[in-house]
Each structure stands twice: as structure tokens, then as C-alpha cells.
Amino acid sequence: MTFVKFNHAPVVKSFGGIVDEIFNNANLNKFIKDDFNTADFFGAHPPVNIYETKEAYSLDVLVPGLNKEDFKISLENKVLTISAEKEAETKDENQKQIRREFSYRSFKRSFTLNEQVDATKIQAKYENGILKVTLSKKENIQDPVKAIVVE
């Protein structure tokens, strides 16, 4: 009878090897590279908070550094589109820029609205770097009560 001895000792990796393995994972690397690691992610996709009350929906779009004239808001086929474009700042030749960590970019966000939104009562206000869009709901018009006679 022959006995074969197996060594089941785990392979020990250094901390650096583990970190390299995590960040060199193709799927994770693609996710980070394509979405969050790009300089344009938050510029092209400003964060939005959406709230609902009995009377309305509210969208708060975080877009500091713009003027209210920079925004375009439109509604077509139940799709609300919010966009902004800001011209590049002119360069001052008497000033040397040492570091630039923020810039102004254009963006476009679209939201599909449901039947409850009253398209005639949409309002927008830009204050303290937040664009607030209020989407009033239609009044609940209920059908009158009707008695059905069983025959």
C-alpha cells in the first residue's frame, strides 16, 4: 500500500500582493476606471437627491459654481431633461496657475416622469449651488361613486 502525503499549508501572500490582486482584478479595475476614477464622473453626473411629499416630487441637483442662466430644463414626452453648460474661463496671462483641482463642465441628466406629475406646474430655483426642481402632483380627481345594479 502506498501513502501519498499532501501538503495542505495555505499559500501565504504578502500584504502588497493581496492589494495588487484586489486592484488588478479586471472587473473591479474596469468599474473604477470607467466610472469613479475618471475626472468627469461627478462633473458629468452631478449627484441628485429626490424627495416625495403628498403634493410634489423634489429634485435637488448639486451643481456649484454655475449661474441660473447656465441651466436648460425641458420636458418632452414625459422625460424631464436638466442640462448646463458653462464656457471655459479665460486664462489670465499675468497669473501662473500652480494647481487646478476644479473646473466647470457641462452635464445632462434625464428623468422619466410618471402620470402623477402636473407638467404645467414644474418650478426650478437655483440657490447655494443646488438646483431645486419641484414637480407638483396632479390633484387626485376621483371618479364619482356609482352604484352597480346586479341583474
Image (cartoon, helix red, strand yellow):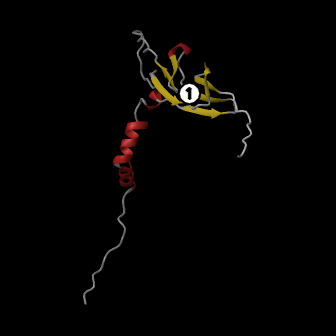
Picture coordinates of residue 61, whole percent (x, y)? 56, 27
Picture coordinates of residue 37, whole percent (x, y)? 41, 36
Nearest the eye: 52 or 20: 52
- Splitting the image into 4 quarters, where does residue 94 fall? top left
* Placement of 124 over or under 25, stated as above or below: above
Picture coordinates of residue 30, whole percent (x, y)? 36, 42
Q: Quadrant of the N terminus?
A: bottom left
Nearest the eye: 38 or 80: 80
* Placement of 85 over or under 142, stated as above or below: above
Amino acid type of the residue tagged 1 in the rendering: Val
Res. 46 visible in picture:
no
| Residue furthest left as drawn | 2
Left of 146 or right of it: where is 11?
left
Nearest the eye: 23 or 143: 143
Q: Residue at x 32, y 74 (%)?
A: 7
Left of 83 or right of it: where is 28?
left
- Splitting the image into 4 quarters, where does residue 64 fall? top right
Nearest the eye: 97 or 60: 60
* Placement of 140 over or under 28, stated as above or below: above
Picture coordinates of residue 151, whole percent (x, y)? 70, 46
Badge 1 marks a residue whose secondary structure is strand
- Splitting the image into 4 quarters, where does residue 35 fall? top left
Left of 80 or right of it: where is 10?
left
Residue at image mark 1: 61
Res. 44 visible in picture:
yes
